[in-house]
Amino acid sequence: MQVRPLVQNFQTSGYTAWAQAANEANAIRNTVMDTLRGRSTPVGHALAQSIKSQGRTLNEMVARKTVQLFGPGATFTTLSQARQNRVYSEIVRSAGRSNPTITARMRTWSRAGRGLIVLSIGLSVYNIATSDQPGQTAVREVAVTGAGIGGGIAGGALAGLACGPGAPVCVTVGAFVGGALAAFGVDMVF
């Protein structure tokens, strides 16, 4: 869904005030942000928290958009009604936009993560294919990989609790250590 046609329709509909539309758009953006963070890994959540700890309030957005549109000396309360509506409409428009820098960064991190998964699966397949006992090796590889994933999630979550949710380095180290310890532990059992 595109925001621009909604904004154009809103301008002609007259059903809701711009202030109310900006308030609703801001609330929806913050809810979506929180929902997506809840579905992330501990490392992803910590990175998101370090970039922006929480969603902005409507007052913060009004102040920010006022300065962006009318300069550093502008005050929202001194603007005309038309200019205030312009600030509110920009809040509605911006609620549907992502930060291109963050989007590019997340795309890179996502590709790196997928690449590591493919590498891990490739090494497991190689180990199974070159083994004298492929059945037993397959069970071991699945157990070690599963333990590594579970340990990484647990280690990242524990590090997030210990260091705080906005500590991406601590959570990343916790995830790595937790995954490595769990994988080595299961590997020793075999």
Image (tube, rainbow, N blue to C red):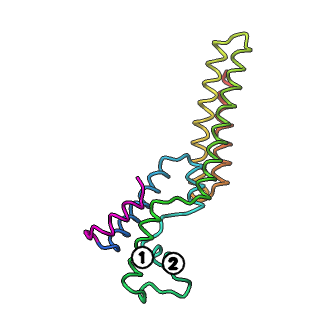
Query: In the rendering, at what x and y percent does residue 72 appear?
Result: 56, 84
On the image, numbered disc 2 is attached to which residue?
69
Q: Tag on residue 86?
A: 1
N-terminal label among 2 and 1: 2
Q: Residue lying furthest top in this view?
A: 132
Q: Nearer the viewer, residue 29 or 51?
A: 29
Q: Are marks 2 and 1 in contact (CB under 8 Å)?
A: yes
Residue 9 sits inside the magenta stretch: yes
- Find residue 138 and report its image quarter: top right
Location of residue 143 with respect to 179 vertically, above or below: above
| Image position of 133 with respect to 88: above or below | above
Q: Which residues are magenta?
A: 1-16
Marks 2 and 1 sit apart, C-alpha to C-alpha, by 9 Å
Q: Amino acid at mark 2?
A: Leu
Amino acid at pointer 1: Arg
- Residue name at image x 61 percent, y 24 percent: 142
